[in-house]
Amino acid sequence: MSWYPTPVPSQSGRRVLVTGANKGLGFFTAARLAAAGAHVVLSGRNPERLEAAVAAIREARPATSVETLVFDTSSLDSVRAGADALIAGPALDGVVANAGMVHAPDQRRESVDGNELVLATNMLGHFALLARLLGHLAPGARVVTLGSLSTMLSTFRTDDLQLTRGYDSWRAYAQSKIASQVVAFELDRRLRAADVPVSSIVAHPGYSIGGRTPRVPGVNEPSTGKRFADSAQALWAQGKHRGAEPILHALTAPGVDGGQFWGPRFMTKGSPVLHRPTRTTTDAAIAARVWALAERATGTEFAVAR
């Protein structure tokens, strides 16, 4: 018997933001939350793709409560505008920090704010977003940051997070995900220290690929060639609909605690289980340096207090 899908408790009355929700893991996370009764805010930088995602969700379940919000996590002005729009509405019961670049550019590029583009998109934008939204999170809210297997496969240069001394696309992606996890675990420590009733959790999707994912018009439409190529990886890969399960578990399941790291049972695929994060991502001294860098790079003071 297949473990998929795992049950999602009723989310009726809850408002959740999912960044990067127009495709991939973000889309399937948003769709499952909406089906469970949550009001889901799907954010992304492309309004047409967001509308296609909403259309797909409503075609499957017409009564779902969803809305779109356009902002780009690589742009701090765009993030601040998005945060302000969210603050104008009801409190959030959950945030899924999913938006990001998986395929980093071959050459080092900078965001409009002058930060290395992959770091800006994957970590700095969410850092600035959460700094602004923290006071708008309801008691008991959960913040789920999207982690990655790459955090177990790369070193981490805290003295060169902007990769000004040497760039390659793999390091850009891996370091951005390590930094994201570092910040997420540090956020939970600071929330606990300040007695703020919000939890910060990390979840990773294993090895989840498009060719193993159901076709959804306007959202996931892999070519025949990609489906064939990805099917050759079936022993160790899963679709993105299944990769969303650890994220959903971290956000909704009873008994989940802040500071935890969830992922697939067999590391690259399978049902959600509790994993052990790397020492680098949970090191408080490393976290202090990364947090300070993020504050400088974003021009944001992220104060965690009641």
Image (cartoon, grey):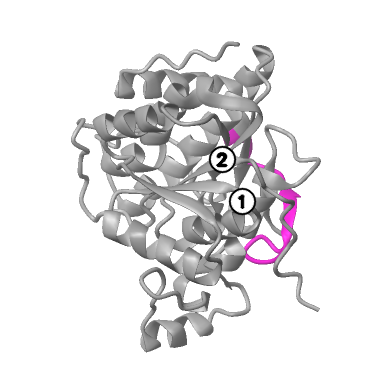
Q: Return the x and y of residue 126 as percentages of the image width and height.
A: 42, 35
Task: Determine the residue positioned at 32% across, 28% down.
Answer: 80
The answer to whether residue 84 is left or right of residue 213 is: left
Amino acid at dot 2: Arg
The answer to whether residue 226 is left or right of residue 61 is: left
Q: Nearer the viewer, mark 2 or mark 1?
A: 2
- 3D distance between C-alphas at marks 2 and 1: 16 Å
- Residue named by callout 2: 15
User: Vertically, is 293 above or below 8?
Assistant: above
Residue stretch rendered in magenta on the structure? 266-281
Q: Quadrant of residue 158?
A: top left
Q: Secondary structure at mark 1?
A: helix
Task: Determine the residue positioned at 31% across, 24% down.
Answer: 297
Q: Is residue 56 magenta?
A: no
Q: Nearer the viewer, residue 255 or 178?
A: 255
User: Vertically, is 295 above or below 224?
Assistant: above
State the quadrant of the C terminus.
top right
Task: Determine the residue positioned at 41% across, 65% down.
Answer: 55
Q: Nearer the viewer, residue 209 or 47?
A: 47
Amino acid at dot 1: Ile
Query: In the rendered picture of this protein, how many numbered marks are placed on residues?
Result: 2
Q: Earlier in the sequence, mark 2 or mark 1?
A: 2
Q: Return the x and y of residue 184 as percentages of the image width and height.
A: 55, 32
- Residue named by callout 1: 247
User: Vertically, is 192 above or below 264?
Assistant: above
Q: Pointers 2 and 1 in contact (CB under 8 A)?
A: no
Q: Return the x and y of residue 3 as percentages of the image width and height.
A: 76, 70
Q: Is residue 274 magenta?
A: yes
Q: Nearer the viewer, residue 94 or 108?
A: 94
Residue 301 circle label: none
Q: Return the x and y of residue 234 as percentages of the image width and height.
A: 59, 80
